[in-house]
Every structure is written in C-alpha cells, then in structure tokens.
Amino acid sequence: MSKRRLGRTELFIDPLVFGCNVLGWTLEEQAAYPVLDAFLDGGFSALDTADSYGKGKSESIIGNWMKARGNRDKVLVFTKVGSDMGQGHRDLSAKWIAEEVDASLERLQTDYIDLYQTHWPDPNTPQEETLEALDKLVQAGKVRYIGSSNQDTALLTEALGVSKAKGYARYETIQNEFNLYDRSKFEEVQATCVAEGVSGIGYFSLARGFLAGKYRTAADAQQSPRGQAVVEKYLNPKGFRILEALDAVSKRNGALPAEVTLAWIAAQPGVGAPIASATSLEQVKSLMRGANLALGTEDLKLLTDAGK
C-alpha cells in the first residue's frame, strides 16, 4: 500500500478515506470507537466528515474519540462547510465560514483542521469572497489546506484562477460522487484534476451498498430503509453488467465486490482516494483490504467497460 500526496500539499494519505457520515446515524458513539480504532490501527488516518452530518454530531463523536485516545497527531481530519445548518440555504459567505469553522473546531476539540472543504456551491456568494475567507483561515493556522466538493469544471477552473491571481490558498482536492456506476460528476472534472494536480476523493464509492453486492433483486430492498431507492436506480442492464464484472474480478482475485470496487476507483487518474464508510469491524477490515488490492490491466478494463 503506497501513500499518495493530496494535491500539492504535504498531506500523504493511504488510498482510503473513512466516511464519517455514519457517525451518530447508523453508528452510535460507543460502537464507533472500536471501528475508528481498527481503521487507525490498520495504518490509515484520514477521516472525512462535515458540519452538517447529524448537525454536528459526527464531528463531536470524532472529537470525543480523539480526546479519549489522545491520538490527534495520528489523525487527518477532513470536514466541510456550506450546507444548511439552520440558515435555510447553502452558505459559503465569509461571515458564515468565519463563524462555522470555530464551531467545527470546538466540536472536534482541536485547534486545526487538516482539510477544510466547501460542501456545495453557493450561487449567492462570489468564489473570490469564499476563497479569501478560507485563505484567512489558512493564514491563521485554523486550517492547513482547503478543498471543494460538488463543483463542475467551470467552477473549479474559476476557483483555481482566483486563487492564483489573488495569491490565496487553492483547492487541493475535489469531492464529487464517483463509483463504477456513477462516474460523470468526477469524470467531468477529471482532466482538470490531472492537469492542475488536484486530487479527487470521491464519495458514494459503493453506490449506497449496491457495488458491495448487497442488492441484487427487488426482494433485497427490504434489507434497509434506503434499499428500495437503490434497487430502483441500479437494478437495470447497466447495473447487472457491473455486478457480473465485479463477480468475475472478485473471483479471480479472491476479494469481495466492495474491495474490488475500491481498488478500481483508486486506480483511476486524478484520484487521491475513495471515501467509504463502515459500521462494523468486519466491514472496516474489508475496506482496508480493498485499499491494499492492486488490480491488473485486464480486470480494470473489464470493470470500466461494464459501466459504459
């Protein structure tokens, strides 16, 4: 397993980021501790959360865990700002960023954030205002590096141009949806990422469980509250082609479909690491195996072609 530089930063991460959207939702605090312990003990370090996950609950659980374990220096904390936290709209204004970063720092019980990301574009705030506010956080030492989420090529290119012209900190990462089935939101910005040295850290890597092989028939929708939506979206000719390819590659490599999926994402140009969540020790161990799996050229092509 080789570490990868995020953008042009001094941050080097393993090819897997733990998605903390499950904390305080499907994984309560005391059950989360051993899962997070296993992730860290496995040699991984990057945790991705957001102020809006559980309206701060995810950040608070991470903060409590780091304090209990005394391991802040071993953890890379990625969080986000800009979602509706009660204002009634997405917000990347300078005023809101200045207020909300302090709230995140308090919940996380730390004095700095490794990667602070804008969560969603805010059409009511110029990017120059947002980037100036983020740059001030970097200069103040509250944030080490900044990233974006859910931007298209036009927005990312504009942001990079503003940072260069004004001498502001620039977006070193972009977090768009990216998996074997849903590729367009990252592939649309992929060429820019490669050219500019911006790292993709895609979310929904397992397509809400579909690419783990969890949902294969309409009856499988009964397994979870979101099962029906997953089945309706993915159980179609394209989805079945991908499952067939995943099964074939999994069998050849002695790996689970989820592990193969993560290995495919990590092998794509411009990708720093996929984000994936786990709610049990068994699941987190499987995700880490996926991060250590290297697929051959033939396997990568089979999977890529299946999702076209």
Image: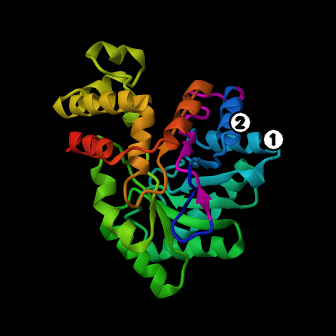
Q: Which residues are magenta?
A: 11-30
**Residue 209: percent from the left, percent from the top?**
40, 29
Residue identifier under label 1: 69
Residue identifier under label 2: 37
Q: Is residue 74 left or right of residue 96?
A: right
- SS for callout 1: helix
Q: Give the residue at the far left of this rendering.
A: 237
Residue at (49%, 38%) from the top-left corner?
Answer: 290
| Residue 269 visible from this viewpoint | yes
Lower position in the chain sequence, tag 1 or tag 2: 2
Residue 25 colored magenta?
Answer: yes
Q: Is residue 290 left or right of residue 243?
A: right
What's the CA distance linking mark 1 and mark 2?
Answer: 9 Å
Residue at (27%, 33%) from the top-left corner?
Answer: 245
Q: Is residue 124 left or right of residue 48?
A: left
**Residue 86: percent from the left, percent from the top?**
53, 47
Circles 1 and 2 in contact, beta carbons < 8 Å: yes
Identity, as a three-letter code, of the amino acid under mark 1? Arg
- SS for callout 2: helix
Residue at (57%, 38%) from the top-left corner?
Answer: 54
